[in-house]
Image (cartoon, rainbow, N blue to C red):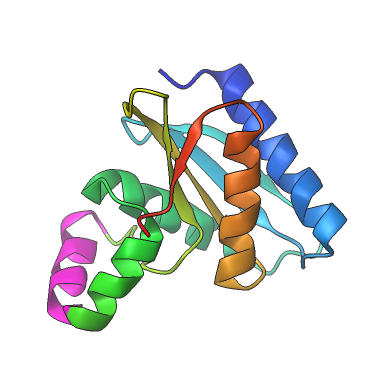
Amino acid sequence: MLTLAQAQTVLASALTHAEKSGFKPLAIAIIDARGAQKAFAAQDGTSLKRGEIALGKAHGSVALGIGSRALHKMALERPYFIEAATHAVGGSLVPVPGGVLIRDGAGVLLGAIGISGDTSDNDEAAAIAGISSIGLVADTGA
């Protein structure tokens, strides 16, 4: 189970990575394996709907059990499937990098982090940094 303390540390570490790297303001959503929100932050200057995009990256990853980098590839190869899956999960699926599954060392799914605000690659890098900071495994779907 992903604890609140773990989620808060992942969030803080992702923000630290983004700030040190000079990223644009980010919104970060962290959910557990059930899809329940554990932590959220939106930096000052983040645009209006970045939070919903971040949550969609995390939620879509948990809903389909793969990181959003893999969802992006699926969207390019099988757009009708991603469209149908988005509908099936209530619209909360954003198939671009920045949604990263959080796994323990044995591969058990604990949750996901979704980040939006900079480029998708930078969003994903901040997510990986946050997850790695507590010794868990980041699964981008690559």
Asked which quadrant contains residue 45, the reply is bottom right
Find residue 137 and report its horizontal and vertical position in percent. 47, 35
At x 59%, y 22%, the residue is 6
Asked which quadrant contains residue 133, the reply is top right
- Depth check: give the residue in front, 36 or 125: 125
Q: Is residue 71 above or below residue 114?
A: below
At x 47%, y 65%, the residue is 97
At x 62%, y 56%, the residue is 125
Asked which quadrant contains residue 91, the reply is bottom left
Q: Is 29 part of what is drawn in magenta?
A: no
Find residue 74 and report its horizontal and vertical position in percent. 24, 71
Q: Is residue 82 above or below residue 58?
A: below
Find residue 110 and report its horizontal and vertical position in percent. 39, 28
| Quadrant location, the N terminus | top left
Most common secondary structure along the magenta stretch: helix
Find residue 109 and report its horizontal and vertical position in percent. 33, 31
Q: Which residues are magenta?
A: 78-90
Question: Image check: 20 left or right of 83?
Answer: right
Q: Is residue 141 above or below residue 62?
A: below
How many numbered marks have been drawn onto this rendered protein structure? 0
Question: Image check: 14 left or right of 56?
Answer: right
Question: Image check: 92 left or right of 87?
Answer: right
**From where the camera sits, is residue 44 visible?**
no
| Quadrant location, the C terminus | bottom left
Question: Image check: 89 left or right of 128?
Answer: left
**From where the camera sits, is residue 129 visible?**
yes
At x 81%, y 60%, the residue is 21
Q: Is 81 part of what is drawn in magenta?
A: yes
